[in-house]
Image (cartoon, rainbow, N blue to C red):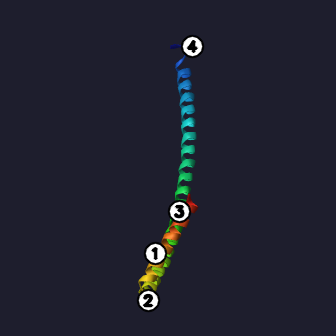
Amino acid sequence: MSFRGGHMRGPNEDSNYLERHNDDLVNGLSSKVAALKRVTIAIGDDVREQNRLLNDMDNDFDSSKGLLQSTMRRLGVVSRAGGKNMLCYLILFALFVFFVVYCISR
């Protein structure tokens, strides 16, 4: 027999104590696994949502790129047709737009 806590225990009491302690540890571990599973599912949902947003942003950038390319093509046609003065006006206009955007973003 072993001596614990001021009284004597038999082999059955020791095995019952160890079994209860083991069951408590298993319950604690299973609750931690369940919490980890919930966190993992939440991370997966967040990743899917962010991928959807990135795909939407990619589509928006593609459409903006197409719009910008067509605008640049038109500006090239206008600059060739209007001569050097028109090109100066375009550059001044672009600088003005950048300055306005800079002032607004500050």
Q: Which mark is residue 81?
A: 2
- The residue depicted at 46 percent of the width and 82 percent of the height is 86
Amino acid type, mark 3: Tyr
Residue 19 lies, with reference to residue 29, above or below; the image says above
Q: Please name which of the two marks, 2 or 4, marks the residue nearer to the observer.
A: 2
Amino acid type, mark 1: Ile
Q: CA distance from mark 1 to mark 4?
A: 90 Å
Name the N-terminal-most of marks 3 and 2.
2
Q: Quadrant of the C terminus?
A: bottom right
Q: CA distance from mark 3 to mark 4?
A: 77 Å
Q: Position of residue 17 (x, y in %)?
A: 56, 24
SS under mark 2 = helix
Q: Which mark is residue 102?
A: 3
- The residue depicted at 53 percent of the width and 31 percent of the height is 22
Q: Residue furthest bottom?
A: 81
Is residue 72 rendered to the left or right of residue 45?
Answer: left
Please give the residue where the numbered disc 4 appears in the rendered image.
Answer: 5
Residue 95 lies, with reference to residue 15, above or below; the image says below
SS under mark 4 = loop
Taking the image as drawn, is residue 2 in sight?
Answer: yes
Please give the residue where the numbered disc 1 appears in the rendered image.
Answer: 91
Sort mark 4 into few (<14), some (14-19) or many (20+) by Cα contacts within 10 Å: few
Sort mark 2 into few (<14), some (14-19) or many (20+) by Cα contacts within 10 Å: few
Q: Please name which of the two marks, 3 or 1, marks the residue nearer to the observer.
A: 1
Amino acid type, mark 2: Ala
Q: CA distance from mark 3 to mark 1?
A: 16 Å
Q: Position of residue 50 (x, y in %)?
A: 53, 60
Q: Are marks 2 and 1 in contact (CB under 8 Å)?
A: no
Name the N-terminal-most of marks 3 and 4.
4
Q: CA distance from mark 2 to mark 4?
A: 101 Å
- The residue depicted at 48 percent of the width and 76 percent of the height is 68
Q: Position of residue 2 (x, y in %)?
A: 50, 14
